[in-house]
């Protein structure tokens, strides 16, 4: 890329950081203006930091009895580790540190648009996406789905290139590892998988080899095989009746 392209992306990043961080700096770092799901995640992260294990049963559903911890575990663990390393409490990590990562989210559309079209189209795409209010909101609330939003354009770019110049089993394995990480981070993983399938269908209809569907299946199966427990249900948990009649889990705790 050229120097001016790097400057453009830096400007987009700084603008995105301002939009996500500046409003939070005006209030106490513990007064988070998020939807309820974010609070659940931070509560789970606090439990992990206090006890160094996943909450079992799931603390979000205590009113319903024994519900296994089914939420992807990596996000609460990362919050807990970051809080322990930095010495900051978890709400402060969410409101003061995470925006620096979330501001990267729109940048991944640039290389995809540049590859499919040209640099002008890529510049328009990244600026438009970065300033779209709904995108700023959903990629600025400490929700791990921002990683999925960042990942999808890069996955599509890699897949389009793979259709023209096969990356081999090692390349497919790398994509499987990335998707496995996404799966353990947030269930929007399934959106990434679906988008990749739609990209495969579009490429095949445009004349690409049909074996792309098999490659897609390899990547998805590998992403599931790499989850904790492999082919056995460690996570997501598999509920089983306990002697007391409650529901317990074979793993995930």
Image (cartoon, grey):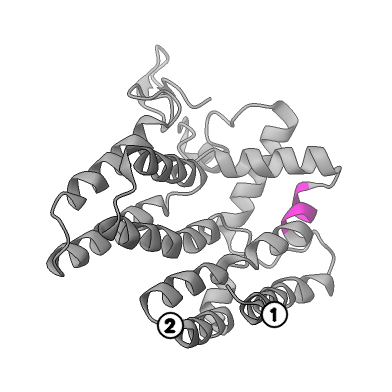
Residue 237's place in the image compared with 208, above or below, is above
Q: Where does the image place residue 58, in percent across and percent down from the top left?
A: 53, 35
Q: Is mark 1 on a helix, strand or loop?
A: helix
Q: How far apart are marks 2 and 1 (CA)?
A: 19 Å
Q: From the image, state whether disc 2 or disc 1 is nearer to you.
A: 2
> Could you say which is closer to the camera, residue 164 or residue 230?
164
Q: Earlier in the sequence, mark 2 or mark 1?
A: 1
**x and y, in percent, of residue 67 in the image:** 45, 33
Secondary structure found at label 2: loop
Q: Label 2 neighbourhood size at 10 Å, few (<14), some (14-19), many (20+)?
A: few
Residue at the spot x=26%, y=48% of the render? 216
Residue 122, above or below 196: below
Magenta region, residue range:
90-94
Residue in view at x 62 percent, y 66 percent: 104
Q: Which of 116 and 130 is in front in this view?
A: 116
User: Tag on residue 118?
Assistant: 2
Q: Magenta: predominant secondary structure element? A: helix
Q: Where is residue 189 drawn, in percent x and y?
A: 40, 51
Location of residue 112 (image quadrant): bottom left
In the image, residue 220 sits, relative to residue 153, either above or below, namely above
Whether residue 121 sits left or right of residue 212 in the image: it is right
Q: How many marks?
A: 2
Q: Are marks 2 and 1 in contact (CB under 8 Å)?
A: no
User: Mark 1 highlights which residue?
Assistant: 11
Q: Which residue is drawn at 57% across and 79% down?
A: 130
Residue 109, percent across and down?
A: 48, 72
Q: For residue 93: magenta?
A: yes
Horizontal side, residue 30 vs residue 245: left or right? right
Quadrant where the N terminus lies?
A: bottom right
Q: Residue at x 63, y 26 (%)?
A: 53
Seen from the viewer's position, the closer of residues 88 and 158 is: 158
Magenta span includes 72: no
């Amino acid at each position: 890329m050229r120097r001016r392209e790097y400057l453009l992306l830096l400007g987009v990043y700084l603008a995105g950081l301002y939009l996500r961080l500046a409003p939070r700096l005006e209030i106490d770092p513990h007064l988070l203006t998020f939807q309820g799901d974010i609070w659940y995640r931070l509560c789970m992260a606090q439990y992990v930091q206090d006890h160094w294990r996943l909450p079992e049963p799931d603390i979000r559903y205590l009113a319903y009895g024994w519900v296994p911890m089914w939420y992807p575990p990596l996000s609460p663990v990362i919050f807990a580790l970051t809080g322990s390393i930095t010495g900051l409490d978890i709400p402060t990590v969410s409101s003061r540190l995470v925006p620096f990562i979330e501001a990267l989210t729109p940048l991944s559309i640039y290389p995809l648009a540049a590859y499919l079209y040209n640099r002008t189209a890529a510049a328009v795409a990244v600026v438009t996406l970065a300033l779209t209010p709904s995108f700023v909101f959903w990629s600025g609330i400490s929700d791990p789905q921002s990683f999925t939003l960042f990942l999808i354009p890069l996955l599509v770019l890699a897949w389009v290139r793979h259709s023209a110049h096969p990356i081999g089993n090692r390349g497919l394995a790398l994509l499987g590892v990335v998707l496995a990480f996404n799966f353990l981070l947030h269930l929007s993983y399934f959106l990434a998988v679906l988008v990749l399938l739609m990209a495969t269908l579009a490429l095949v209809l445009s004349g690409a080899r049909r074996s792309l569907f098999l490659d897609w299946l390899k990547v998805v199966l590998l992403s599931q095989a790499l989850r904790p427990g492999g082919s056995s249900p460690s996570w997501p948990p598999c509920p089983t009746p306990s002697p007391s009649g409650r529901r317990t889990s074979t793993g995930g705790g």
